[in-house]
Amino acid sequence: MLTFTLPLLLLQAAPEATAPAPAPTPPPPACAEEVHDGFDMWVGEWDVFPNGSETQVATSKIERLSGGCSIRESWMPFQGSGGTSVSMVNHRTGRWEQLWIGSDGRRVDFTGGVVTSEDGPKMVLTGYWDGVGPNGGDILARMIYSAQADGSVRQHGEASTDHGLSWQTSFDFIYRPKDRDQP
């Protein structure tokens, strides 16, 4: 009788097996909200042409960095000075900011965001560019980025010397994906 009781006692005294606690769900990435997608159209490697021309004037590499929280452009024109921009969504204001630094040492701080138009969403950034206007004055610069139906991106730059009352085109570029066959 002891032989049957002892295994029964051992089974009763054995601790119950417990399932491991599930791992906590990691928080979403810091820059995963929809507002951070505003410049996705521009990320890539590009051959750059003046709008309406087949003469390439530059290459540009735009890449996501910092876990997707920033976007860096490396602008490499065939003539003239190049530069770099870094764009991000300001976590306090929810607005896009871009810092442009040209190889001439000048900088521009742009702010803006995505606007909806009848042509689709566009990224619009504005900022004062010091010392490049008439007689060395400042200009208000506006850049409008828009995805095109063929997969290219248009970057239309405008300048104002009257604080935005009137605008003149300063450049109009089409960014074509590098891996696309040329027309």
Image (cartoon, rainbow, N blue to C red):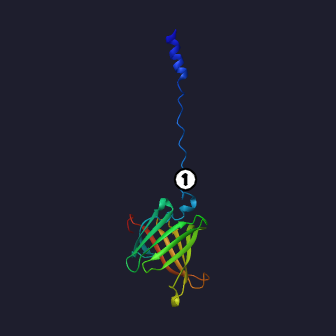
Residue named by callout 1? 28
How far from the left and from the top, in percent, is residue 175? Answer: 45, 70
What residue lies at 51% left-to-right and 62% top-to-bottom? 69
How far from the left and from the top, in percent, is residue 121? Answer: 57, 66
Is the residue marked by circle 1 packed among few (<14), some (14-19), or many (20+) residues within 10 Å? Answer: few
The quarter of the picture where the C terminus appears is bottom left
Name the residue furthest bottom: 135
What residue lies at 52% left-to-right and 91% top-to-bottom? 135
Residue 51 seen anywhere in this rendered image of the structure = no
Left or right: where 139 falls relative to 52: right
How far from the left and from the top, in percent, is residue 104? Answer: 43, 81
How far from the left and from the top, in percent, is residue 109? Answer: 53, 75
What residue lies at 53% left-to-right and 29% top-to-bottom? 17
Q: Nearer the viewer, residue 165 or 13?
A: 13
Q: Is residue 80 above or below residue 20?
A: below
Location of residue 179 by image quarter:
bottom left
Q: Nearer the viewer, residue 31 or 4?
A: 4
Total count of labels: 1
Residue 156 seen anywhere in this rendered image of the structure = yes
Assign a secondary structure to mark 1: loop
At label 1, which amino acid type do we have?
Answer: Pro
Name the residue furthest top: 1
